[in-house]
Image (spheres, grey):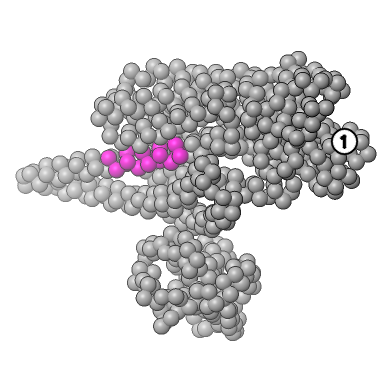
């Protein structure tokens, strides 16, 4: 009787989005052949109570039975959540209101069954009970990999609230990975340095492994692709290892700076190739063991090679050393967690993608520092050549002129490339790194339990603005980078400007209502223009967004659309809080405007206004800015005839 009462007291009854590992009992089935009926017949003493919030069974081929007891509530929908994306086989057994056994079969190697939501976790929609009673769920877990099982029992409301923080973090580092990939791909296309190509391949393969397997975002592409990624997960990791070694070799100039490390690099590369074939032939258990050893080895060896190269005079290696030191410490902590030396937690689960993203960011800084050193060396070489040219006698005048022209051409190309690099690098380094630092700060405070639930909820709500800002920055950055690379084609067509404006304005009505802004619209004459619809849509969206951002609470915005002899004129005028803070000269130039905060601290980078000017010019129009006493007005004129 005492044991029964004890089990009842440990039931999972709070139904919040928290791991309940300490409230569960588990049993190892080494033969992986036990049936549900055999498990039910076992005495409670055969089960072991969980010691940590997240169950960690290690790299095992056994099947594991988990027993969950809870008090069912009257007509309360519940979800059983296995909050891991890469468990191969999950079998859950419970009973419905008529006491009939209901089975759910899911996992990363199975297609989506009814009543199971497969995203980057598995959510089982449990049968709704008609009365309050004690219930037991039996869950069978089986995988040929490391088996870490964060298990939750929650209501729909707690699921939505609980996932906000985790998804916010994931969206930030996904945005960073995409930004780093595009930024360095653009640099490779601009300067044709293979070091950037190897870095892009490393980012691409490592991001694919992290997002599609570790974090389970392969579900976006459907069941077949998701199952494929989970059947051969370490194929991407093997490519990532090879790409990282190629990048390190090229970046450090190993033959000159650390020749003793070349042999180790070849050995590790060979192991990476072996990992590819082991994973491709389906030996997942063995591939996992090799992957664990290989990730730690690559990080340590790459770090040692960086230290040796730096001691031998390779100054750009300082960020490189910091990056690999950070990642091998991260990998070591995760390995200790998976080995059971330290307990698994939500922090250790997120540590690999966050740590890898920071590593890639630091490596990008290292590439920038390397490029600065190259520019300085080339500048010194140019100076020496100029001195040599000036000392030539009159007989070599024609040769001197020819050499001077070549040098001037080289200077212009380098200055243009360096300007593009600095502009893009400053945007990504500031506006994508700052939101990440903010999120990491919230995460650290949460882990140290220094925040109350209300404070945490408030900080997460404020962080949504940062995520929206990062998304808008990436959109503008992608359009601008595409136009700079010559990939943006202007395809003109005839369309009505008024419906396009009304469609975009409808998207912003909730935000306008929040700030209690009064709108006034004046539409006169024909609104048909000849321009690229997508480019003009981006221009209108930026102008509407800026007007809302800088209009004070209960302020006014005027929209004017009118037909004039030159074509169609569209104007946006909004009130401002402090007219003295408006830098009209900065806005009217052809450079990127200074970033500023909106009335509710909305962030921006000043790129949107530059895009508006370029796109209006591409479409044969004109762009104007006028400042009044307490307002600012942006106007554009587009041709109405071809």
Q: Name the residue: 64% across, 37% down.
A: 216
Q: Secondary structure at mark 1?
A: strand
Nearer-the-camera pick, 371 or 317: 317
Q: Name the residue: 58% across, 75% down.
A: 516
Badge count:
1
Residue 475 seen in this snapshot: no
531 relative to 155, above or below: below
Instruction: Describe residue 157's horizontal placement relative to residue 275 as left or right.
Output: right
Q: Quadrant of the N terminus?
A: top right
Q: Name the residue: 41% across, 18% down.
A: 264
Q: Which residue is at the far top? A: 31
Magenta stretch: residue 276 in it? no
Instruction: Describe residue 623's horizontal placement relative to residue 21 as left or right.
Output: left
Q: Position of residue 212 (x, y in %)?
A: 61, 36
Q: Which residue is at the far left? A: 393
Q: Position of residue 241 (x, y in %)?
A: 49, 27
Q: Position of residue 547 (x, y in %)?
A: 51, 72
Q: Which residue is at the far right? A: 98
Q: Which residue is tagged 1?
A: 95
Q: Which residues are magenta?
A: 358-373
Instruction: Describe residue 380's horizontal placement relative to residue 258 as left or right.
Output: left
Residue 566 seen in this snapshot: yes
Q: Main secondary structure of the magenta part?
A: helix
């Amino acid at each position: 009787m005492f044991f029964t009462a004890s089990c009842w007291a440990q039931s999972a009854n709070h139904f919040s989005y928290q791991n309940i590992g300490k409230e569960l009992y588990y049993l190892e089935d080494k033969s992986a052949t036990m049936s549900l009926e055999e498990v039910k017949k076992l005495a409670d003493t055969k089960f072991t109570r969980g010691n940590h919030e997240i169950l960690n069974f290690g790299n095992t081929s056994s099947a594991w039975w988990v027993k969950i007891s809870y008090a069912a509530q009257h007509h309360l929908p519940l979800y059983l959540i296995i909050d891991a994306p890469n468990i191969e086989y999950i079998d859950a057994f419970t009973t419905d209101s008529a006491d009939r056994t209901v089975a759910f079969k899911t996992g990363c190697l199975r297609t989506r069954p009814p009543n199971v939501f497969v995203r980057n976790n598995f959510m089982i929609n449990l049968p709704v009970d008609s009365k309050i009673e004690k219930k037991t769920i039996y869950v069978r877990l089986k995988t040929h990999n490391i088996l870490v099982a964060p298990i939750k029992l929650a209501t729909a409301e707690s699921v939505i609230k609980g996932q906000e923080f985790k998804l916010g973090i994931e969206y930030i580092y996904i945005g960073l990975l995409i930004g780093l990939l595009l930024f360095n791909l653009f640099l490779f296309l601009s300067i044709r340095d293979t070091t950037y190509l190897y870095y892009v391949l490393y980012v691409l393969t490592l991001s694919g492994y992290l997002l599609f397997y570790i974090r389970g975002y392969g579900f976006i592409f459907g069941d077949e692709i998701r199952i494929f990624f989970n059947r051969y997960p370490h194929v991407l990791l093997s490519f990532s290892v090879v790409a990282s070694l190629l990048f390190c070799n090229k970046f450090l100039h190993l033959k000159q700076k650390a020749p003793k490390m070349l042999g180790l690099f070849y050995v590790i590369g060979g192991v990476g190739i072996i990992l590819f074939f082991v994973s491709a032939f389906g030996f997942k258990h063995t591939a996992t063991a090799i992957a664990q050893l290989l990730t730690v080895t690559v990080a340590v060896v790459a770090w040692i090679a960086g230290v040796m190269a730096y001691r031998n005079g390779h100054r750009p290696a300082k960020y490189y050393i910091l990056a690999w030191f950070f990642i091998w410490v991260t990998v070591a902590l995760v390995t200790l967690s998976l080995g059971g030396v330290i307990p698994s937690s939500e922090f250790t689960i997120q540590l690999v993608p966050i740590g890898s993203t920071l590593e890639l960011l630091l490596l990008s800084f290292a590439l920038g520092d390397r490029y600065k050193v190259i520019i300085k060396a080339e500048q010194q070489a140019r100076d020496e050549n100029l001195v040599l040219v000036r000392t030539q006698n009159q007989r070599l005048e024609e040769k001197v002129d020819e050499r001077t022209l070549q040098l001037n051409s080289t200077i212009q190309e380098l200055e243009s490339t360096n300007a593009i690099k600095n502009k893009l690098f400053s945007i990504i380094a500031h506006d994508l790194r700052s939101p990440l630092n903010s999120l990491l700060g919230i995460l650290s405070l949460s882990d140290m339990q220094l925040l109350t639930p209300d404070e945490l909820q408030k900080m997460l709500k404020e962080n949504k603005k940062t995520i929206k800002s990062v998304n808008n920055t990436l959109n503008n950055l992608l359009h601008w980078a595409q136009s700079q690379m010559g990939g943006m084609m202007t395809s003109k067509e005839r369309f009505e400007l008024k419906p396009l404006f009304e469609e975009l304005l409808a998207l912003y009505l909730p935000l306008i209502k929040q700030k209690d802004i009064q709108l006034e619209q004046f539409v006169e004459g024909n609104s048909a223009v000849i321009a690229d619809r997508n480019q003009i849509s981006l221009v209108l969206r930026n102008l509407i967004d800026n007007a809302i951002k800088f209009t004070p609470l209960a302020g006014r915005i005027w929209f004017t659309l009118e037909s004039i002899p030159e074509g169609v004129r569209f104007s946006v005028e909004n009130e401002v809080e402090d007219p003295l803070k408006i830098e009209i000269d900065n806005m009217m130039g052809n450079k990127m405007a200074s970033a500023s905060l909106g009335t509710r601290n909305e962030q921006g980078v000043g790129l949107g206004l530059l895009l508006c000017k370029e796109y209006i010019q591409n479409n044969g129009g004109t762009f104007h800015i006028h400042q009044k006493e307490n307002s600012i007005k942006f106007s554009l004129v587009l041709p109405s005839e071809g």
